[in-house]
Amino acid sequence: MSRPFLALSVTGILLLTATPAALAQARPACPLLSTADAARLVGKPVGAQKESTMGAAHYTACRYTADDKSPAAVIDVEVYWQFAKMTFDGYCKGAETVTGVGDAACAAIDTVNVLKGQSVLRVRVPGMASPAWRTKGLDVAKAVLPKL
């Protein structure tokens, strides 16, 4: 292996590895919304919350389910801690703009996406009829945003 290739490989690895500062920003999504608050906001019982196993330095998620035995989500809360503008723009392509929440917001299908500073909050309320899902999603977003 030549020295230029080795130097390029090490540089590439360092660029792709999260910095300690970025790792410090990533924090679990579940503490942002209690099961009691989630149930109150969506108007459905919530029996369990589970941190996503897919969490990374730039992303964390929490799934609230009807009970411990049911895999069906009542609500999903995701937070992206890095690449906020790029992530938000990607999720909002072709989506309807929503006003009055965060720095910018959009809604599509059953998900509300909110940009706040350097974070993106996604709230998904599956299985709820439209437009109720949007109202519930916005209610959850407004409750979580001050905690970001």
Image: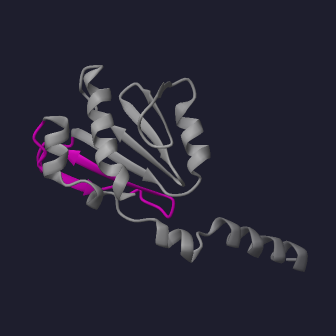
Looking at the picture, does residue 5 appear above or below residue 81?
below
Residue 12, image quadrant: bottom right
**Position in image of residue 119 (x %, y %):** 49, 53
Q: Which residue: 55% across, 76% down?
A: 20
Q: What percent of the width, then of the height, locates residue 146? A: 35, 54
Q: How many labels does the image show?
A: 0
Extreme residue toward the top, this view: 130
Left or right of residue 8, residue 35 in this image = left
Its colouring scheme is one colour
Q: Residue at position x 89%, y 75% from top?
A: 4
Q: Is residue 103 left or right of residue 67?
A: right
Name the residue at 24% across, 27% down: 127
The residue stretch that appears in magenta: 44-71
Q: Find out whether residue 60 is within the magenta segment.
A: yes
Above or below, comparing residue 31 to residue 88 in the picture: below
Whether 127 is drawn above or below 53: the answer is above
Q: Main secondary structure of the magenta part?
A: loop
Q: Nearer the viewer, residue 26 or 119?
A: 119
Give the quadrant of the N terminus.
bottom right
Q: Relative to 113, is 135 on the left or the right?
A: left
Extreme residue in the bottom direction? 3
Q: In which quarter of the image is residue 137?
A: top left
Whether 14 is among the magenta residues is no
- Note whether 136 is above or below 14 in the view shown: above
